[in-house]
Amino acid sequence: MTHADGRVESHRFPSTDEQWPRLYYHRHFMVAERVNQLVSLPAAEEWAVELRDRRALVDELMRAGHGELAKEAEQQIEASRAGYEEQLMLRDELLHGIAEYFLRYHDAQSIKVYSVRHPLPSPLDVRAGAELDDPASYLERLVYQLPEVQELPLESLEEITP
Amino acid sequence: MISAAWAAARQWFVDAWRGWEEFWFKPSDPATLSLIRVLAGAMLVYTHLLWTIGLDRFLSADSMLSVDFVRHYHGTSWAWSYLYYVPAGVPLWIVHGLGLLVLIAFWVGFKTRVTGILAALITIAYVNRVPAALFGLDQINSFLAMYLAVGPSGAYYSVDRWLERRRTGIGKRGPLPVSATPGATVSIRLIQLHMCLVYLFAGVGKLQGESWWNGEAFWGAVANREYQTLDLTWLASYPFIIAALTHITVFWEVSYSALVWFRLTRPFIVVVSIPLHLGIAFGMGMITFGLIMIVGNMAFLAPSVVHSILGRFGLDEPARET
């Protein structure tokens, strides 16, 4: 977050330092999990390709004379498209709610919300000396910001520094 | 021969109906139900007390989970909550405070028939308001609250009973009969069946994941830094233990809904729930979830066992069922 005086501060949730007791921490954990699910949706271009491929299948079925199957496939495409758009709306509403709340809570001027992914190390990694909280194992991605900008670089990945 | 077959079939239906009636409606001592009320009631109070810290962040009209988001998330108008309509600030504090008072009243067993229903409604209203912040604890809290409201969960270990003793002039240790009731049976059976469904769906859901088949799943709990409260990473050197714990977990969950009903296997199934859920509680930091699952398993304790255990600590009441 950036304040009016130029000061920049950073917070994370869930965080055992900032959220206590454990149940309160876990509430934030679940919201973070939900954010992760929603920002893991296919990107618009990827989704467009998938829709195009599925529509090509529908065309193929029609040409082969399988009208009923083609109709069923078309309905499934429509349901998937509606589901995807609904998930996008939920994603945007959730991220907007989080950003707006913390902007107000910290009395800041602007805020960037990052989703942090933390893949689990395997037993072999741990036996080789890997630490569970190794900073290099955290993958950070900008997912929302206020004030809003036109284009959001959702593809960028940056390593977080502790 | 046909009449014999018909008589046999008819008898089968008669026996099945009798079994159904006995399963659901045979009057039973509400001691188990009352104990669950005390323990689950305490968890309800704690869960909602914690919301006090996050009242503005999670529950207010200005929270990070906006009412619009929540309504879209549910996708149905059936996910009702009075919290949608309470303005932020003082009104929310008042409504929240009143809710806590009702939950405390239910926990201690005051006007249990009324506070039980209100407690169930309050629990459901809160979980509907914050869907993105929920986990297993809330699901168990919700159905326990609902089923405790069905039966006489304030019959024992309650302020209601203490008041009844005062009203009848019978002292603390005097006999005060408690009726065995079908309501207690219905409540307990609902809890038992729901616990079976929880474990069955959890177990079958796990079987859809490859890591539960190849024995690696337990490592997922160990290696998750954000869940971890006990450092069990030393298990990386003992893959056999990881595999054994993985397979025991899924076997226990999948078989629970069958084996818990037989007298021979029930004690084993219920006892295994204790280390399993304590492991979740203290190894993964989900203390509330681990404990409430153990409370749910107590639905399989016979009332006589409850009396016996509490009696050893001087906590039981002298009266028995009539």
Image (cartoon, coloured by chain):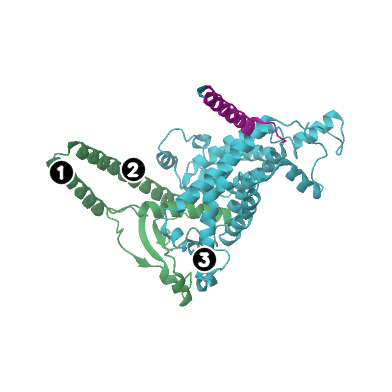
Chain colours: A green, B cyan
Nearer the observer, B213 or A49: B213
Coordinates of residue B106 in the picture (x, y in percent): 68, 37
Residue visible at 18% across and 46% down? A57
Judge the density around disc 2: few (<14), some (14-19), many (≥20) Cα neighbours within 10 Å: some
Residue A59: give its label. Answer: 1
Nearer the observer, B200 or B99: B200
Which residue is identified by label 3? B242
> Residue flagged by tag 2: what amino acid is it?
Glu
Q: Is residue B16 above or below residue B191?
A: above
Residue visible at 15% across and 43% down? A59
What residue span does the magenta drawing correspond to? B3-29
Judge the density around disc 3: few (<14), some (14-19), many (≥20) Cα neighbours within 10 Å: many
Determine the chain carrying the residue at label 2: A
Nearer the observer, B266 or B160: B266
The answer to whether residue B13 is magenta is yes
Front: mark 2 or 3: 3
Q: Could one spot residue A54 in this view of the protein?
A: yes
> Residue flagged by tag 1: what amino acid is it?
Asp
- Locate residue A141 relative to residue B219 in the image: left or right: left
Residue A86: give its label. Answer: 2
